[in-house]
Amino acid sequence: MNNSFFSDFGLFLTKRSADIAESAAEHLVVVLVSLLIATVVGVGIGVLVWNRPIARSLSIAGAGVGLTIPSMALLALLIPVLGLGWVPTIAGLAFYALLPIIRNTVVGLSEVPPAVSESAQGMGMGPVRTLFRVQLPMAWPVVLTGVRVSAQLSMGIAAIAAYVGGPGLGEMIFKGLSSLGSKNALNYALVGTVGVILLALLLDAAFVLIRRLTTSRGLRV
């Protein structure tokens, strides 16, 4: 890379800064929305099955099998049902984000010492209150780790969602790859790729902060 490349790249960034910022914001929003849906569904499933061996195995296995489906193939299958744009993107990302969240919710709840749950019940807490006041707070660091893994997974897959007209930086990557040999092909691909990496790092740093702020001092490791 010579000085001419950096000069052209700087000019590209300057001229398209608004488009880049808009694409980055859309990319982050679609990941956060899908992650929120996956967290609600995944934690809910984990809470329902963590102490039921057969249901637990089926849930984790089902989510694991789903994760083996190529992302582009799944997104293509969603087109006839959900069309193009935000909806299939969010649905696909939420689907792929489920496995780490379900698995970590199950693991986190399973690691809560039975004596702690028995003590809570001995103090007059019912099963539901024990779950929300004792078990889930103790399992939270493990659950959050699963959400954190899903966030990184979703950040990368969101770029592929440009295939179904999804929002975000993937559009720039695809535009660059489809116009190889043109003046700005490398610029588009580079901005999209680096942008996804930077967003992933920022989101991961946010999860580190969230974990610190939401985990009691006694559970920090």
Image (cartoon, rainbow, N blue to C red):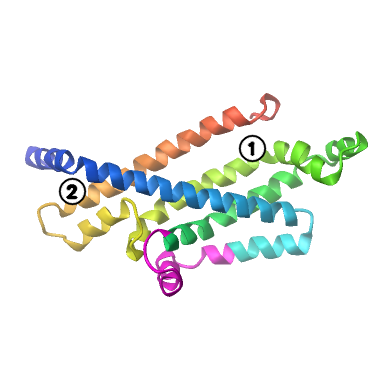
Q: Name the residue rendered at 16%, 61% in the picture.
A: 179
Identify which residue, 85 or 161, lies in the foreground.
Answer: 85
Residue at which label 1 appears: 141
Q: Secondary structure at mark 2?
A: helix
Horizontal and vertical percent position of residue 185? 16, 54
Quadrant occupied by the C terminus: top right
CA distance for labels 1 and 2: 40 Å
Residue type at mark 1: give it.
Pro
Residue at which label 2 appears: 187
- Seen as rendered, the residue at the extreme top is 217
Q: Residues at badges 1 and 2 in contact (C-beta under 8 Å)?
A: no
Mark 1 nearby-residue class (10 Å; few <14, some 14–19, many ≥20) = many
Which comes sooner in the sequence, label 1 or label 2?
1
Question: Would residue 8 be counted in the magenta stretch?
Answer: no
- Disc number placed over residue 26 in the picture, else none: none
Identify which residue, 180 or 199, lies in the foreground.
Answer: 199
Residue 114 in which image quadrant = top right
Q: Name the residue rendered at 46%, 57% in the picture.
A: 90
Horizontal and vertical percent position of residue 210? 55, 33
As drawn, 3 above or below 162 = above
Secondary structure mainly formed by the magenta segment: helix
As drawn, 35 above or below 91 = above
Residue type at mark 2: give it.
Asn
Q: Name the residue rendered at 40%, 69% in the picture.
A: 83
Horizontal and vertical percent position of residue 85? 37, 61
Q: Which residues are magenta?
A: 64-86
Q: Name the residue rendered at 51%, 56% in the picture.
A: 94
